[in-house]
């Protein structure tokens, strides 16, 4: 949407785009891909593709609805919100979603959302692992990474396509194509690349897909490579160029503007004006294209792409097809391109270009699937499987919020640091030792020190307002040690002996108790194995560990 | 979607809901309201309303598309993402969005996203201020609060409705209705309330709207109060109850389950089973409702709501109308309610209930608008206006990301801290000094120290795998200083003298070079002014600054 802007222009742009998608569906296009870009004035006003694709789902019947791409850094989109919107789109479209992903790359976006460029690749890898698990795990078993913390939840709704919609990643360089292959997902190559170069990329991509370098990021492999080209079609070549070349060139110019180092003043910089002033010096000369018309050379310098006649575009797509490119995507809504011309191009494409590529297509795809099946099976065996968490987790808002905040706060508070050190030392005392060894070290004096320490470590913020007595019955080879912690509003006190009116009693072997506190045993497992017994107020149990500064798995 | 779940059930639920919205639009309903709930199994599988409402926009012509509500805590939805999706929905629906907001309240949601209950009200107030400014400020002038940090950006697209869609807030208590009034926005009262109680709430709401307590949260006032009731219609009362009472009761039961303190094990707890076992003891007895049929008492205990005949519901709505309630919302998709019965109810409502309330409606609304106009004008004068930031801001990714991270990162890594200190000291040496002064300080010894420091600061993670030589030709009043940095895989080395085979050569005045490195000059501007010349691999240039821990120009 090049400047100057007029009232109602965005409305027209969006309504036109919906009409165009409807035509594309009708004439036989397989995919519509929509970007997610933020703050990129004039270049892209498509910042909420989940909404637009939701709308497009009801204007179309068959076409696949592709996110090209969703920005995965958690500061832009929370992973659970991404899983939810992908699943919802899959439901309203009856299983037509393709889930393209990316990291965001422009300074406008990274700076706008506070995403560190050096972190974004790791964030992508972390987020796609979490999101694909949200699709398949029921419940999602929780997450604890530097950028994503989430307790166990059943993320709803679930996708129609199983295990989940096909995954893609945006690529702009050879390294990212390799990266896509290593992750077993489709490569959406958003760069202008000649067929011969594309061929080398494709070969490398499939070599990796079929090698043990491929460890799928999701729970299915999507082996596909796409290239992107600007497009405008007309039976008369000069008309096609007249209609489409400014859009193609502005697309390239604005891309360089936002992804290069050109200064940008939000709300003020006039990218269209800069384009008019500088296009010639950037090799984006309208006159030069017109002078060289006649052969449709896909030349990255000229950026003419698929602006030409149907015959020229058939020839061009053939060249990509012959080197193994799976899909060619066309950019039509660029710069000042007119809606009517875009619609005409789509119709003409359906009539005069598409039929050249539909014959034998199912057979080709079946052959490809068969050829890759063993490699895909082997790759999926390398992916860490979906987790099944044991039942018995209880949603505990206060503890969960406290955990989510940990590590987000600038400085760990001193008490928490003390607790952490205590725990670490404790782990060393317990880990790998036999019951007898642990018990021996935990005689009456050690018990006194330990329970006094536990009382000191008491964190009232994790108790949910509980006051009362907790009783610990620790069995030993030589009998039983019984201790009681009296929990007041702000502090706790330890004393030896049974409680008068215990809110909760834990009965457990001394060694297992110490293992739990040291983070060396899982209380839920012990409970299921009958090695830990509880009586009284069960709801207190999941909080206990945290009430005394113990570790949490989430 | 009560358990047990079957394959394809969510698909049917979503497709049915779209059909229902289409009917509601056709028969004359004014609004469809859709919740945003996360992880609330069985109670609500509507977690991405932006997608569903996007779809609904293309199945309807006239009905308003209401978010009831969007969760505003920034950990759930980034404020810019909210502004973007609201605007996009406004564009695809041609201006039919109502923007309902809320804070999230269930433990499943607050714990799931790590939102502290005591913070969420402040977060709502902070976020709605930022979001409404994103709608009207061009560019949005930026934000810096404990929960939201964002540099200046033009948030795109803009809404069709000006200044923005009507604002609402979810209310469940008398205090939140007062809160809505103080913020000058509509009250979406998602609680079951008798007409007489509703009347007291409405009076209080409008008293505050017309008082100087009202300081609008947005840039327009939306004076409206809605109440919510479960509904099922049939000409035969017993049939209406038979069809609708389990849904109405399950809705109330599941609400209490998630918003009370009932334990919930994600993916395991069977809320429907618990409902069957406990409904009677909660006053949700099917038999009792049937026994008392005949008069439609809206009784919060029985929760029968608008389950009855058209005549009964006309009477009920009249009672709400008579006490000044502006809108009644009906819950139909609840529990096991069947799609066919919901569709029949919608049709019957359009035929036999709605006509009683349409006559004179425009006049009533015009009278209300006229009555409130002076109060609204006065209220808007109390709202802090949209800001106009001066031109000249430049997107600066590194500085922006650093600002966003402040207070978020636990510990800045030592190397980064060293680089920052180096840069700050450096800035002081350079800023405000003349070329001659800077050159004087940058003699051969200083050059040696400086380039050695640059080599030490080299960050291989920012180089994109580049190895090779970078040549720096720094012109001075007394000639030229030439230095070369040899970049290896993990480290860099500095040496005086020209490179043998430079990948990139920078030619620039010594003073300008130091200003760039100190963040006191913009390399892109220098490049455009011809004060910085590059030769070689241009694509390296934008990376240079980051490769050496310098500030980024964009």
Image (cartoon, coloured by chain):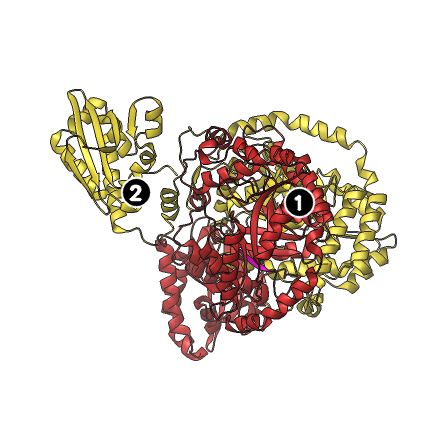
Chain colours: A yellow, B red
Closer to us: A226 or A518: A518
Q: Chain of mark 1?
A: B
Residue A279 horizontal side relative to residue A210, left or right:
right
Write down the quadrant of residue A178 in the picture: top right
In the rendering, at what x and y percent does residue A90 appear? 64, 39
In the rendering, at what x and y percent does residue B274 appear? 47, 30
* Position of the N terminus of chain B by quadrant: top right
Residue B361 visible in the displayed image:
yes
User: Disc 2 or disc 1, which is closer to the eye?
Assistant: 1
Residue B541, compared with residue B3, is above or below; it is below
Q: CA distance from mark 2 to mark 1?
A: 52 Å
Residue A553, compared with residue B29, is above or below; it is above
Q: Chain of mark 2?
A: A
The secondary structure type at the circle numbered 1 is helix
Q: Which mark is residue A162?
A: none
Residue A459 horizontal side relative to residue A136, left or right:
left
Q: Which mark is residue B311?
A: 1
Closer to us: B276 or A69: B276
Q: Which residue is outermost to the top?
A: A477
Question: Residue drawn 42% across and 78% down?
Answer: B433
In the rendering, at what x and y percent does residue A263 appear? 57, 66
**Which residues, given as a range, are shown in magenta?**
B165-170
Closer to us: A52 or B202: B202
In the rendering, at what x and y percent does residue B453 appear? 38, 61
Residue B59 visible in the displayed image:
no
The secondary structure type at the circle numbered 2 is loop
Residue A177 falls inside the magenta stretch? no
Residue under numbered circle 2:
A463
């Amino acid at each position: 949407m090049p400047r100057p802007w007029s009232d109602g222009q965005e409305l027209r742009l969006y309504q036109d785009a919906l009409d165009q998608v409807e035509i594309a569906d009708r004439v036989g296009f397989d995919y519509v891909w929509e970007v997610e870009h933020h703050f990129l004035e004039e270049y892209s006003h498509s910042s909420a593709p989940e909404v637009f694709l939701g709308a497009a789902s009801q204007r179309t019947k068959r076409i696949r609805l592709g996110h090209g791409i969703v920005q995965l850094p958690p500061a832009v989109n929370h992973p659970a919100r991404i899983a939810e919107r992908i699943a919802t789109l899959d439901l309203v479209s009856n299983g037509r979603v393709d889930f393209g992903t990316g990291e965001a790359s422009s300074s406008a976006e990274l700076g706008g959302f506070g995403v560190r460029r050096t972190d974004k690749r790791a964030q992508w890898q972390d987020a796609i692992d979490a999101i694909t698990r949200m699709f398949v795990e029921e419940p999602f078993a929780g997450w604890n990474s530097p950028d994503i913390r989430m307790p166990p939840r059943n993320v709803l709704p679930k996708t129609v396509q199983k295990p989940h919609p096909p995954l893609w990643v945006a690529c702009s360089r050879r390294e990212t194509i390799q990266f896509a292959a290593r992750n077993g997902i489709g490569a959406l190559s958003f760069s202008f690349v000649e067929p011969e170069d594309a061929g080398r990329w494709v070969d490398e991509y499939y070599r990796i897909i079929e090698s043990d370098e491929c460890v799928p990021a999701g729970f299915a492999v999507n082996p596909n490579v796409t290239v992107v080209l600007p497009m405008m079609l007309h039976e008369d070549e000069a008309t096609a160029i007249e209609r489409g070349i400014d859009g193609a060139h502005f697309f390239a110019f604005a891309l360089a503007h936002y992804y290069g180092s050109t200064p940008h003043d939000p709300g003020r910089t006039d990218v269209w004006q800069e384009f008019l002033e500088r296009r010639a010096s950037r090799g984006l000369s309208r006159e030069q294209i017109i002078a060289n018309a006649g052969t449709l050379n896909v030349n990255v310098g000229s950026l003419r792409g698929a602006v030409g006649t149907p015959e020229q575009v058939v020839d061009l797509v053939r060249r990509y097809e012959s080197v193994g490119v799976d899909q060619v995507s066309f950019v039509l809504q660029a710069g000042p391109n007119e809606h009517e011309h875009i619609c005409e191009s789509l119709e003409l494409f359906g009539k005069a270009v598409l039929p050249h590529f539909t014959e034998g297509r199912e057979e080709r795809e079946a052959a490809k699937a068969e050829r890759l099946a063993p490699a895909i099976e082997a790759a999926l065996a390398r992916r860490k499987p979906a987790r099944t968490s044991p039942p018995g987790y209880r949603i505990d808002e206060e503890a969960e919020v406290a955990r989510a905040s940990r590590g987000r706060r600038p400085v760990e508070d001193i008490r928490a640091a003390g607790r952490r050190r205590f725990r670490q030392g404790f782990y060393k005392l317990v880990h790998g030792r036999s019951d007898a060894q642990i018990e021996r070290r935990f005689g009456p004096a050690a018990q006194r020190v330990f329970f006094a320490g536990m009382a000191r470590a008491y964190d009232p913020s994790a108790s949910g307002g509980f006051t009362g007595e907790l009783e610990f019955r620790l069995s030993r080879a030589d009998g039983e040690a019984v201790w009681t912690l009296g929990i007041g509003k702000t502090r706790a006190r330890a004393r030896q002996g049974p409680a008068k009116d215990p809110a909760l009693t834990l009965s457990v072997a001394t060694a297992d108790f110490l293992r739990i506190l040291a983070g060396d045993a899982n209380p839920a497992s012990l409970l299921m194995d009958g090695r830990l017994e509880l009586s009284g107020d069960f709801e207190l149990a999941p909080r206990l560990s945290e009430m005394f500064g113990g570790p949490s798995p989430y």
